[in-house]
Image (tube, coloured by chain):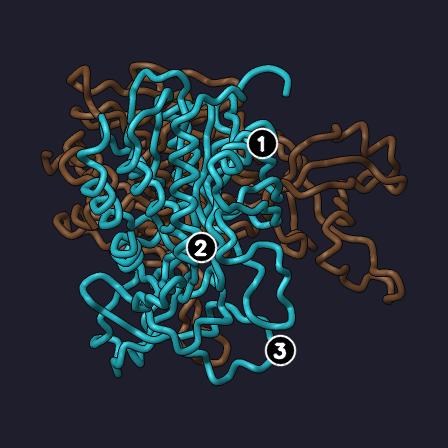
Chain colours: A cyan, B brown
Amino acid sequence: MKSLIRKLTSTYGPSGRETAVREIVAAEIRDHVQSIEISPMGSLHAVVNRGGKKKVMLAAQMDEIGIVISYVDQQGHARFHLMGDVDLGMLHGHGVRFPGDIVGVFGLDPGWSEGKELSAADFRIDFGADNKGSCPVHVGDFGVFERPFLDLGERLVAKGLGGRIGAVILVEVIRQISETPHELQFAFTVQEEVGRRGASTSAYMLAPEVAIAVGATAAGDSPGKGRTEVVLLGQGPAIRVWDLRMLPDRRLVRHIVDVACQTGITHQMDALPTADADDPSLRATRAGACCGRISVPVRYLHTPSEMVDYRDVDEAVRLVVELTKRTLDVTEGED
Amino acid sequence: MTAEHMPSATPSAEQMRLIKRLTEAVAISGNEGAVRAIVREQVEPYVDELRVDTLGNLLIRCKGRSSNGVRVMLAAHMDEVGLMVTGAADDGTLRCKPVGWVDAAQFLGKPVWIGRHRLPGVVGAPPTPGSAAGASANPAETMQIRIDIGAMSKEEAAGKVRLGEQVVFATELTRLGPMMRAKALDDRLGIAILIEIVQCPPAEIDLLAAFTVQEEIGLRGAEVAAHRMEPDLAIAIDCAPARDLPTRDGEENTRYSTRLGGGPAVYVADRLTICDPRIVRLLTETAEQQGIPYQLRQPGEGGTDAGAIHLSRAGVPSVSVSVPTRYTHSPASYASIADWRATVRLLHAAVRRLGSSLLEDSPWQH
């Protein structure tokens, strides 16, 4: 699975430009699913066991945070607009990649004064060009962070890891599924980082009864005095119970926890205010779905160097596979 | 496509008169009847289906030649920003609240029209506490602005103007050489463009024209229009702010959004929508083939009806095309006649190149 993580995270795919990621996902799962379709938005839907007992949607985003070029100045430096929730404090000195092996570096305007709030307008992208004509990018080009995949043993570091780890897990789940009573609807969605735009449209198309988003959650154990210790790397997948946009269905949460306990899967509970996966949009589409969320803890989320623990990814795959094997009786009635 | 059908690069006297009527119509969000009546009169002879939906959207279908033509939605919004009368004060002035994104400071000292019959008034504000009488109000105190209509008491004011009445800038359209100055060019220019497309519809596609309501307060008309129309793809026709004046310090203007005279502004991404790259490419290629000037609108904030349309149901590949407009949402917005005509020409040519193959043959190639 490490090679899949490397492949998917190193692939270019900012919001709205997920084609390359989609093609990799399609190639990886083609032999294991009954059908593959692409939504009008560009999300990939794959079905296993069509006509099964319950329509269970498993969603993960394909996109990653990035930028779009808004201007190239006379000196050949580019200005940009953010696509997604980019942590600006991390940009200075970082690389940015565009299609066609074009790489530039973010530089902070020396005129920026300490204490002033950072905005995208405080940065330039330097491609080594010295005039407008020699700048290799144009207005409207989308870029992503440049960062080589790092294998630190149990810990992995990459750009786009927070965005893609859910897709890695679902690809692996699809390969491992042997039997399921449900119609499993795998949705690899577009445009999560700019407002879950792929999730709501995919949920409309698929009309699931149960929907589980698989993605990343911010780990609270980054080194330093301010560590919150809420979600820890290496302690297994995090099962969300609350965030500002989404109250996961408590019957579904209990079911997930029960399955994890029965099968000896290390797990932790997760209650963080930030909504950073597709689930809020899955819950509210059409007449609504019974919705939950399973996440892998990620340090340095929304920076070019996101870190996960490989064991958490492995356990998340096991947990989702175990869930797909069992009947789910949570959509109707009292808890 | 035959050359004689291509809309002309210079407007006819009749087209100028239509723009004048449209911009001078009084129609803030939720009260679009005056514009809807003009649109209806202009398009009725040309359409196969016409309906006004529950929210007030005017929805039109011009059937294509084949029964399975691609369903293309073109949307332009009928509403404009303005104020709404919320009460009368003891001194006979009217209280009001903004509708849509308006800067209250824009209104101070400006003549306004109240209601469809254009009762004249002027906007003022109570003096800021502690300042000398007559000193200008803090623009942030939006809710404090008042309208003088010549009434000397609360009763007299209430007799002249009903609660909920709409208030717009009192600006008549003036042509300034190659330019024009008017209120509400945003989006009456888009309305005029869409009328022209409907009057000469393409034969190969199912044209779904939506003249929408309540765009300025959150794309509310477009959302329900798209749900009903179920298009395969969509183009929002709007006006984009042109912040293209030279900067004060003589530095390069890096955040102009669009430039007057640069032709139609094709969107790549704004706050609400990432435009479908296939339709963006179709538009830019069409412009290049036809020798029509165009520009890419700088990716950034803002949004159009496409923001609601592209998320409708299972999603709709969408794009926005705008006429650059200076001083949008002010008493006197300012646009280039050549940009307006180039936008009609681009859309006229582009919708004739749209077919189902656009979406089928090139799925998300970038």
- The CA distance from mark 3 to mark 2 is 23 Å
Q: Residues within 10 Å of mark 3 (few under 14, many from 20)?
A: few
Whether label 1 touches label 2, CB < 8 Å: no
Establish if A19 lies above or below A185.
Answer: below
Please identify the quarter of the rendering in which residue B253 is found: bottom left
- The CA distance from mark 1 to mark 3 is 45 Å
Secondary structure of residue under mark 3: loop
Tag 3: amino acid:
Gly
Establish if A62 lies above or below A250.
Answer: below
- Of A39 and B292, nearer the camera is A39
> Residue A115 shows which numbered tag?
3
For marks 1 and 3 on the same chain, the one whose residue lies earlier in the sequence: 3
- Residue at the image position 62 percent from the left and 46 percent from the top: A271
Residue A235 location (% of width, % of height): 52, 53
Quadrant location, the N terminus of chain B: top left
- Residue at the image position 36 percent from the left and 47 percent from the top: B274
Please identify the quarter of the rendering in which residue B307 is found: top left
> Residue A84 shows which numbered tag?
2
- The CA distance from mark 1 to mark 2 is 32 Å
Closer mark to the observer between disc 1 and disc 2: 1
Q: Mark 3 lies on which chain?
A: A
Q: How crowded is mark 2: few (under 14 residues within 10 Å), some or many (20 or more)?
A: many
> Residue A254 shows which numbered tag?
1
Q: Can residue A24 be seen in this view?
A: yes
Secondary structure of residue under mark 1: helix
